[in-house]
Each structure stands twice: as structure tokens, then as C-alpha cells.
């Protein structure tokens, strides 16, 4: 099926350290991979996305890497801050316009 | 644009009652998604529409769930009869089909079935 697997489920990091979340997808035809951040009680919001014609994209303290051969992509957050504490969802857009999400990762930044 | 608008924000209903959730997508967006969020399953895709046509409803859990999109600016998700295990946050999202662009979420409807 068209699934997205996300690991680990919960990640605790010390403030200032880096956090990495990994996702795998099942369809090699997928070409768009967004990451969403959901703060407590709020809606998911896009923080960064990557298209299949690039291997890495950065935006300040966050970056996403894509390995199409292995069908996995990762979110990297550097110099973590308390406001980075949230649930992060990866997603993949499949060929039939189906946008499927992973189960989410709870990131806790410890001050 | 006000973004994706969902109503109601909160709904508490008794088991067996019919529940209707509503969504207004962003103007110009021609794809609309309904997701259900729970702690156990994360964001589950229930159904999505392209140009008002349902494309994939394989995520709809049971026949008690149905969704419609009568026009480009309105969609409903109906649960009849509702059960306690339907309690969750239901999100609607919209985007432009055919482009690798962002999907925007509504604020969600928190449904509690007692």
C-alpha cells in the first residue's frame, strides 16, 4: 500500500542539541515530501518540503534530506530550542494525488 | 483568504446520533482531504476529492462514515450512527492538484461521542 513510516515515535533532546526524524515511503514514483509541525491544540503547518529532483534543502535551523534509492527522507533540526517542542509529521504525495502522512513524532526539547 | 474553514470546532454528541462536519477549502484549491487524528493512529487519510469527485475512500473506516463535496467550496463528513470510538480530531485540508505544493489544514473539529 501507499504508506509512510516514521521513526522514532518520541524524541527527547537537550536544548541546543540536534534532532533527527526519519521517514520511509513505499512508492518510488512519489516526488513531493513535506514536513508538518503541529503544536499542542493547533493544526499541522508546513515547515519545509522537498521535491524529488533535489537531495537536500535547508531553511535556517531545519533541513530535509532525501534518498530516493532507499526511499527515505529525514528532518534535521539543529540548535534545538524549547519552541521546537511539537509533533512532527512527514508525508509523501503519491501518483494519484494521495497525500499520506506518517504517524508523527513527538519532539521534546529539554531546557 | 481566511484559509480552510471547518465547523464546528467542537462537537459533543451522544452515541447513536448523526454528526456532520463541514469544511470550506481555500478558494482555487481543487483537492480536498479529510483526515482523522488520534494518538494511536496519527493522521489517517479518510477520503479525498479532486475537482469535487471522490478519488479514494479506502480510508473510511466503516459504512457509517460518508463524505460529499457538492461544489468546489464545500464538503461534509457525516457519521451516522456515531460511536464512542469515533471520538477524535477531524481535519480538512486543501491544496492545488497537479503541483507539488503545500496542503493547508483547517483548525479541525474535536468530536466527542459519549
Image: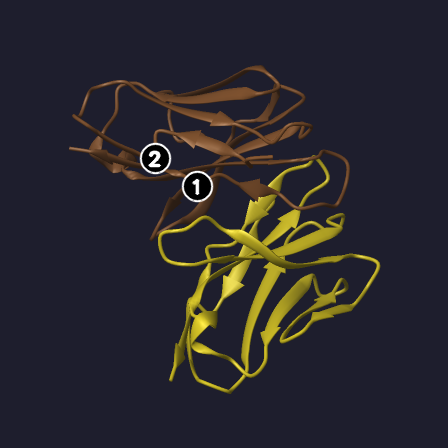
Chain colours: A yellow, B brown
Residue A1 in sight: no
Q: Which image quarter: residue B50?
A: top right
| Badge 2 element | loop
Report x, y in % for residue A29.
76, 48
Q: Dot 1 corresponds to which residue?
A: B107
Relative to A2, say whether A58 is above or below.
below
Q: Residue furthest right?
A: A53
Q: Which image quarter: residue B12?
A: top left
Quadrant assignment for the N terminus of chain A: top right
Q: Residue furthest top?
A: B70
Which class describes the residues within 10 Å of circle 1: few (<14), some (14-19), or many (20+)? Answer: many
Q: Are marks 1 and 2 in contact (CB under 8 Å)?
A: yes
Q: Is residue A5 left or right of residue B60?
A: right
Which residue shows up at 48% across the image and 78% down it? Answer: A81
Report x, y in % for residue A108.
39, 74
Pointer 1 and pointer 2 on the same chain: yes
Q: Chain of mark 2?
A: B
User: Rounded to the nearest whole Å, what is the CA distance between mark 1 and mark 2?
Assistant: 7 Å
Q: Which image quarter: residue B82?
A: top left
| Residue in the foreground of this view, choosing between B23 and B44 | B23
Which residue shows up at 30% across the image and 18% down it? Answer: B80
Q: Dot 2 corresponds to which residue?
A: B9
Quadrant assignment for the C terminus of chain A: bottom left
Q: Is residue B105 left or right of residue A110?
A: right
| Badge 1 element | loop
| Residue in the foreground of this view, choosing between A88 and A61 | A61
Report x, y in % for residue A45.
54, 52
Relative to B17, say whether A37 is above or below.
below
Which residue shows up at 63% across the image and 69% down it? Answer: A74
Q: Chain of mark 1?
A: B
Amino acid at each position: 500500500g501507499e504508506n509512510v513510516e516514521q521513526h522514532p515515535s518520541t524524541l527527547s533532546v537537550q536544548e541546543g542539541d540536534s534532532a533527527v526524524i526519519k521517514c520511509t515511503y513505499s512508492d518510488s514514483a512519489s516526488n513531493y515530501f513535506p514536513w508538518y509541525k503541529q503544536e499542542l491544540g493547533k493544526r499541522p503547518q508546513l515547515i519545509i518540503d522537498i521535491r524529488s529532483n533535489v537531495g537536500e534543502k535547508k531553511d535556517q535551523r531545519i533541513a530535509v534530506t532525501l534518498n530516493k534509492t532507499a526511499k527515505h527522507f529525514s528532518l534535521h533540526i539543529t540548535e534545538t530550542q524549547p519552541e521546537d517542542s511539537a509533533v512532527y509529521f512527514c508525508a509523501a504525495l503519491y501518483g494519484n494525488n494521495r497525500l499520506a502522512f506518517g504517524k508523527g513524532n513527538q519532539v521534546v526539547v529539554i531546557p | 483568504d481566511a484559509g480552510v474553514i471547518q465547523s464546528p470546532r467542537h462537537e459533543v454528541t451522544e452515541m447513536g446520533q448523526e454528526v456532520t462536519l463541514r469544511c470550506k477549502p481555500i478558494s482555487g484549491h481543487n483537492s480536498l482531504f479529510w483526515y482523522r487524528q488520534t494518538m494511536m493512529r496519527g493522521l489517517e487519510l479518510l477520503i479525498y476529492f479532486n475537482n469535487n469527485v471522490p478519488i479514494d475512500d479506502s480510508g473510511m473506516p466503516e459504512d457509517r462514515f460518508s463524505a460529499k463535496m457538492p461544489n468546489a467550496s464545500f464538503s461534509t463528513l457525516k457519521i451516522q450512527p456515531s460511536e464512542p470510538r469515533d471520538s477524535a480530531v477531524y481535519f480538512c485540508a486543501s491544496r492545488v492538484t497537479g503541483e507539488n505544493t503545500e496542503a493547508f489544514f483547517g483548525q479541525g473539529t474535536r468530536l466527542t461521542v459519549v
